[in-house]
Image: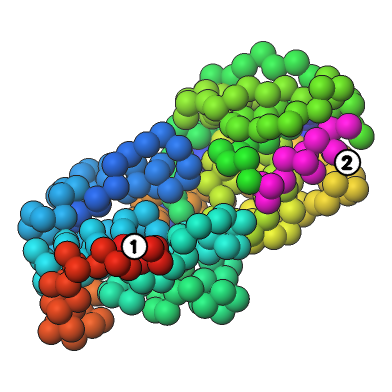
Amino acid sequence: MRGSRQRKSQDDGQQPVRLERVLVSVRVCIPIPFRPEGGGQYFLQLFRRYLSAHGHDIVDDVEVQYDVLFTNHWVVPLATVLRGLRHNPDARLVQRVDGVAADYGRSGNADRRQAAVNLLADVTIFQSEYSRWAARTAYRVIRRDGPVIFNPVDVDRFRPDGDRLPLPGSIRVACVSWSTNARKGANEVYAVARKNLDVSFYLCGRFRDLPSESRNLHHLGVLGRESLASVLRSCHVLLTFSRNEACPNHVLEALATGRPVLYVDSGASKELVGPCGLSVRPETFRHALLEIHDDWDSWCVLARERAMTMFHPEQIFPRYLEAIQAALERPTSCDRRIRALCASLGPALVPLRRWGWA
């Protein structure tokens, strides 16, 4: 799948833009154990790595001393947050907001949980403009405003050069999903595959109800990070019909490996992809694929350049630290006495658990 114009990739020598204001030293509590699943976990893995490499301390026990308590959307229960603030009344609470659970099609009390935590947050960070709009305007889950900071991508692991797999097919399309939620778009992928039998589709992650008659669908299952990077390099494009995503990491990973993205215009995908892919519907897939095919090399160079300049960890994480430093330089968002009262009520919050607030 070669293009008509040849351009040499410049990613190896390209340096991301760095911000000038840097936090000298901070101790951050991240009370979220790592599990190899979902984009949020890999964000935290990169964040921990960055903090350690830049001389900051990381703890996971909310009862020890620290400057910042970091929470990830609805993952840390309110009772745990209050216990942490009881032991560290002057700590700043930073909440990274992924998106709205109801918007994803997720059931349960996740939105109530993140709404309750946000009432005490000193910094609210949204992963995209779409994330902020959905959380504050469309669903009114998050009360406190804050900056939009895109997710970073591991540009060393997900890069154009590296191991490739001998995958069959003259045109190879990668599809990636951790969740089997219907809004992830698996059914649309199956429909496109049935109508494009000369295209090979490689499904990475969890996909269910695969149509048995589609011989061009190849389910590779849940992959490790290195294996996923190899598959992306071995395919020509990433296809995603996922809807209402706040900042889909598989899109960033495809761009970092130098692969253009075909995406449904929903959620933050258009914000992320920019000029490095095309918006598609099932009925327009083939036309878009052929448009990329005609100048594939140029699309690939643009994709890698966008990842390096917009989603490089050295571009993203200094903005996190700037937001944290700004919070440390101003009073807590809640009056200290009110916050102390809330924190002291931590053990009495058991009745609120039925509503998902603890």
Q: Quadrant of residue 293?
A: top right
Judging depth in this view, the residue of 338 and 238 nearest the camera is 338
Q: Amino acid at mark 1?
A: Arg
Q: Is residue 356 visible?
A: yes
Give the secondary structure at mark 1: helix
Any mark on residue 286, and which?
2
Q: Callout 1: few (<14), some (14-19), or many (20+) C-alpha neighbours within 10 Å? A: some
Asked if the stretch drawn in magenta spans residue 24, the answer is no
Q: Quadrant of residue 25?
A: bottom left
Which residues are drawn in magenta? 182-194
Judging depth in this view, the residue of 206 and 199 nearest the camera is 206
Asked if the stretch drawn in magenta spans residue 183, the answer is yes
Q: Main secondary structure of the magenta part?
A: helix
| Residue 29 relative to residue 351: left or right | left
Of marks 2 and 1, which one's residue comes earlier in the chain? 2
User: Which residue is label 1 attached to?
Assistant: 353
What residue is shown at x 53% (from left), y 60% (from top)? 101
Q: Is residue 102 above or below residue 194?
A: below
Quarter of the image that includes the C terminus? bottom left
Q: Amino acid at mark 2?
A: Arg
Q: Is residue 62 above or below residue 82?
A: above
Instruction: Residue 356: give x, y in percent of width and height.
Output: 39, 63
Instruction: Residue 341: give x, y in percent of width and height.
Output: 15, 79
Q: Is residue 303 visible?
A: no
| Residue 216 relative to residue 18: left or right | right
Q: Callout 2: few (<14), some (14-19), or many (20+) C-alpha neighbours within 10 Å? A: some
What residue is shown at x 74% (from left), y 53% (from top)? 264
Any mark on residue 200, and which?
none
